[in-house]
Amino acid sequence: MIEISNLSVSVKGRVLLNGISAVMEDGKIYALLGENGSGKSTFIRALTSYFPDYSGSIAFDGRELKTFRQKEREKLHSLLPQMLPHFDLSVSSFLSMYPDGKKELSKLGLGYLLEERMNTLSGGEKEMVFLAFALSRSAQLYAFDEPEAGLDAMYKEKTENAVRRLAEGGKTVLVSFHDIGRALRIADGFMILSHGELVFSGNREELLDDNVIERIFGLKRALFTDENGEKHILFI
């Protein structure tokens, strides 16, 4: 369990996060929503030790994050960042940094990329390689910052399946989304940030009952039925 209490982050006098409190349970997927500049990436980076000077508390199973040594922190979380770095080496060499890297890429059905070079991959292929890298690390929290941005339907499905697999294995998963429909499809819990503050935290039913999506994002709710007769909510 990860407990966040009154978390605040400021950089050069600018408040990026202000007084956030939330709880994330093991074995669940949490969607992080918010407009551009709302603080989603900052929140993820705070949980993954990139902002060591935060105020408030971030506790992993009751122990404050700041009390963990660097080697211990590396086992707490695995991050797939929004901006991916560039490497001029083979996919196989990159994934060899962790023993299960190549295996995770094969689980994604993309083992054929192993002999390719990182700087020749398409954007979607590169995202999948970094996803495999993140999956290969043993951690308590897996944090993905806009992992589906720019992906086609096939890669989105692969990402979704991987995220579900982590949660089924008892891991805590935090995923930031722009697509509210995708978040509703995947997540168990939801957090919405606005101007660095947490304006909603709850489950799917609470999110839909609270009309928070309409209020925060200015969207309208529509109901449609798919070819199998199942009803779905769409925000437009």
Image (cartoon, rainbow, N blue to C red):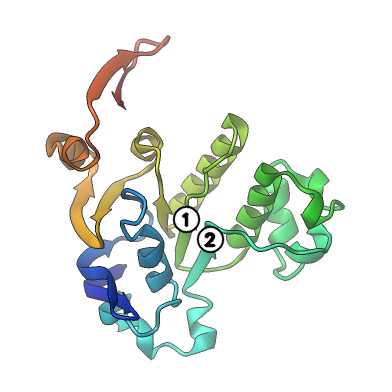
Say above or below: 142 vs 36: below
Residue sitting at x 48%, y 56%: 144
Label 2 or label 1, whichever comes before in sequence order: 2
Kind of residue sitting beneath label 1: Asp
The reply, left or right, for residue 199 in relation to residue 224 is: left
79 and 63: which is toward the camera = 79
Q: Which image quarter holds the N terminus?
A: bottom left
Q: Residues within 10 Å of mark 1 (few under 14, many from 20)?
A: many
Q: Which residue is mark 1?
A: 145
Left or right of 204, for residue 53: right
Location of residue 3 by image quarter: bottom left
- Res 40 quadrant in image: bottom left
Tell me what residue is drawn at x 23 percent, y 25 percent.
221
At horizontal 47% and vertical 90% (from top left) the residue drawn is 69
Tag 2 residue: 81
Q: How far from the left and from the top, in percent, is residue 188?
A: 31, 45
Q: Which image quarter is the C terminus in?
A: top left
Picture quadrant where residue 125 is located:
top right
Of helix, strand and loop, which one carries label 1?
strand
Q: Report if residue 108 is visible in the image.
A: no
Label 2: few (<14), some or many (≥20) within 10 Å?
Answer: some
Which residue sits furthest left? 210
Are the two marked residues, 2 and 1, in contact with CB atoms closer than 8 angstroms? yes
Q: How far from the left and from the top, in percent, is residue 157?
A: 55, 35
Q: Is residue 63 above or below residue 120?
A: below
- Residue 48 is at least partly visible in this image: yes
